[in-house]
Image: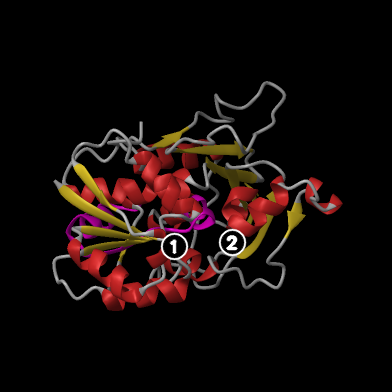
């Protein structure tokens, strides 16, 4: 039986990983006593007793946890930002390429992508890798997400009786263009510059839509929406956790709205290609706690174990 330790198991991502381990008789979950959750000696004991340790921690705590892993056989899956651009770590998005999948399969260190970065990379990586846009294309991105991705303190404010009036509205943030996902968005997609990124947090629990606008006249050639759609379908063929919708999207409402919360609680991602021959809009829809966090972490575990990657996820 595979022994699993979740360092940070009381946080949102850790709890969601535990949910996805329900009815998994192949796994033994090692638990840490509440009063010892921050005790490095006890954490080290459990990390080194595990086959796999998940890190659901702030960046500095995740870096510390890696230093506690002295057992060379322990494989670590890190859900923090700390190691996503480290070339020694596998980037935990297997659908991007066969090389990504193989590195996850064989690595002892895997960094789970950020939620926004997952939706961004799913759209932009194939564009660059397949030669549709040049690395120096001026990529811009807008995104909307539920409040669950903001952490326990923000969740408490959104769900509290004294919620500020402004929290009833979508709120832009990261306006100085220093969002923590930007380095991985640039590096993983092979972009020459960081994208301009405008995220919004909204008053619903979970789910997100990430959107990339394109001018065909600025691409390597004047590609049509149909050509981009065809490329996406080829790139993500036989990937069970990524669904490429037909043009305009069979899941779009008849009035043309694309809701951000319809995959809440799910572990897959949907891609949409919309627009016309002059202006194209690409969107990805996912649960920021699913394919954007805990679901992606469990998918990586399954691949590393050599079992069906959708185990516990569909």
Residue 139, label in figure: 2
Tell whether position 101 is magenta. yes
The residue drawn where x is 68% and y is 21% is: 254
Q: How is the image coloured?
A: secondary structure
Residue 244, image x and y in percent? 45, 35
x then y, percent, for residue 298? 33, 47
From this viewpoint, which residue is outermost toward the front? 35
In this orientation, does residue 299 appear? yes
Return the disc, 1 or 2, that comes first in the chain's sequence.
Answer: 2
| Magenta segment | 96-121
Using the image, determine if residue 224 lies above or below residue 34. above
Q: Is residue 131 magenta?
A: no
Report the residue that reaches farthest toward the top: 254
Is 60 rendered above or below residue 128?
below
Q: Quadrant of residue 88?
A: bottom left
x and y, in percent, of residue 287 in the image: 52, 42
Q: Which disc, if any, is residue 189?
A: 1
Q: Mark 2 and mark 1 in contact (Cβ < 8 Å)?
A: yes
| Any part of residue 169 in sight | no
For label 2, the crowd category at 10 Å Cα-Cα, with few meaning under 14, some 14 to 19 and many 20 or more, is some
Is 172 situated left or right of 14 in this image? right
Instruction: In this rendered view, identify the residue nearer to me: 12 or 173.
Output: 12
How many marks the image carries: the answer is 2
Residue drawn at the location 22% of the way across and 47% of the way down: 28
């Amino acid at each position: 039986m595979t022994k699993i330790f979740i360092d940070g198991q009381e946080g949102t991502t850790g709890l969601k990983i535990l949910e996805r381990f329900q009815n998994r008789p192949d796994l033994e979950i090692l638990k840490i006593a509440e009063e010892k959750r921050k005790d490095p000696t006890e954490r080290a004991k459990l990390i080194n007793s595990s086959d796999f340790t998940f890190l659901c921690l702030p960046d500095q705590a995740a870096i510390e946890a890696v230093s506690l892993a002295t057992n060379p056989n322990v494989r670590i899956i890190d859900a923090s930002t700390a190691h996503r651009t480290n070339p020694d770590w596998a980037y935990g998005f297997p659908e991007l390429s066969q090389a990504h999948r193989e590195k996850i399969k064989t690595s002892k260190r895997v960094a789970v992508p950020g939620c926004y970065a997952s939706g961004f990379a799913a759209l932009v990586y194939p564009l660059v890798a397949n030669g549709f846009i040049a690395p120096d294309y001026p990529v811009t991105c807008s995104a909307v997400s539920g409040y669950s991705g903001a952490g326990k303190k923000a969740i408490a404010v959104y769900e509290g009786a004294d919620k500020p009036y402004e929290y009833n509205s979508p709120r832009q943030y990261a306006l100085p263009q220093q969002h923590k996902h930007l380095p991985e968005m640039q590096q993983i997609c092979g972009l020459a510059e960081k994208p301009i990124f405008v995220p919004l947090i909204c008053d619903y629990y979970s789910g997100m839509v990430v959107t990339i606008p394109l001018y065909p006249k600025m691409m390597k050639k004047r590609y049509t929406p149909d050509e981009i759609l065809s490329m996406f379908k080829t790139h993500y063929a036989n990937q069970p956790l990524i669904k490429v919708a037909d043009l305009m999207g069979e899941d779009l409402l008849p009035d043309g709205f694309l809701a951000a919360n319809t995959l809440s609680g799910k572990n897959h991602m949907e891609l949409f290609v919309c627009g016309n021959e002059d202006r194209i809009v690409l969107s990805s829809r996912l649960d920021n706690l699913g394919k954007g966090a805990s679901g992606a972490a469990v998918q990586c575990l399954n691949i590393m174990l050599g079992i069906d990657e959708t185990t516990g996820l569909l």
